[in-house]
Amino acid sequence: MTGFDRSDAVDRLAGIVETVANERMPVPVREVWAVGDVALGLDPVERLDVYVTKDVLLRDDSEPTEASADGDESDERDPNARFRESHGIEGVGKSVRADWAAEFPDSLRANANGHAAPERCLAAHLLADDEPVHLEVCNSSFEDNVTQRLRGAQLREDYTQLLDPRGVCLWAEGTRSDEAFRKLRAGDLALPTLSAALEMLGLDDDEAEAAARELHAWRDRQDGVTVRGDIV
């Protein structure tokens, strides 16, 4: 896919929210945000940017899984061992929910160290591989992480790590914002350019323009689904 018509982009966001609201997720999800181009009223939307606030899984709240038909209860006792054997992935029941992995094993994904990666699992559950969608996943709220990532990008002089601060909350703590969807469909959100938004966060004119160019260039190089996760 090369992009979305605006109405299709908003429909796709509605589908993501519907899935988060009604299906078991690999980790608890608190918020879903639409970010960047789709929030600006652009048509078409070349890439859809979505931000998800999740909880770190400190204690798995999965319901016990049923023992296998031959009476082997090992799956119930140790989901980590089960998925290490079946998928070569560690951490099920620790970094992602065991009952989610049992229900959606095809969406189980690992990081480079072979441990279940919540952000990659969320991307696999919510998105198709060929969709032009970028998913940001963090345990921190969108507004807090915007400032955290800005400071980090400045320290590293790598503005591809920025979060576009122009976002709209679509779903939070189980409640869908119908007004946010209405404004998205109508293009009624009054948001500044990216460089102007970065100036509002404290960058000077030249730095804001350079940061905006670098982030736009990074986005233009992406293809299909991309996902990034961090912990604040």
Image (cartoon, rainbow, N blue to C red):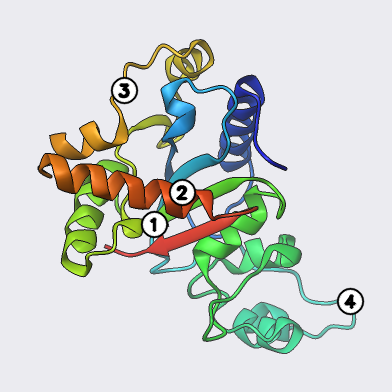
Pair 2/4: label in front: 2
**Mark 1 or 4, nearer chain start:** 1
Task: Give amino acid for label 4.
Answer: Ala
Residues at marks 3 and 4 touching, judged by CB atoms closer than 8 Å:
no
Could you say whether the residue bearing mark 1 is in a helix, strand or loop? loop
Residue linked to disc 2: 29
Q: Residue at x 68, y 86 (%)?
A: 88
Label at residue 191: 3
Task: Give amino acid for label 2.
Answer: Val
Pair 3/4: label in front: 3
Q: Residue at x 58, y 53 (%)?
A: 25
Could you say whether the residue bearing mark 3 is in a helix, strand or loop? loop
Residue linked to disc 4: 69
Residues at marks 1 and 4 touching, judged by CB atoms closer than 8 Å:
no
**Mark 2 or 4, nearer chain start:** 2
Badge 4 local density, few (<14 within 10 Å), some, or many (20+)?
few
**Mark 3 or 2, nearer chain start:** 2
Residues at marks 1 and 2 touching, judged by CB atoms closer than 8 Å:
yes
Q: Quadrant of residue 46?
A: top right
Residue linked to disc 1: 55
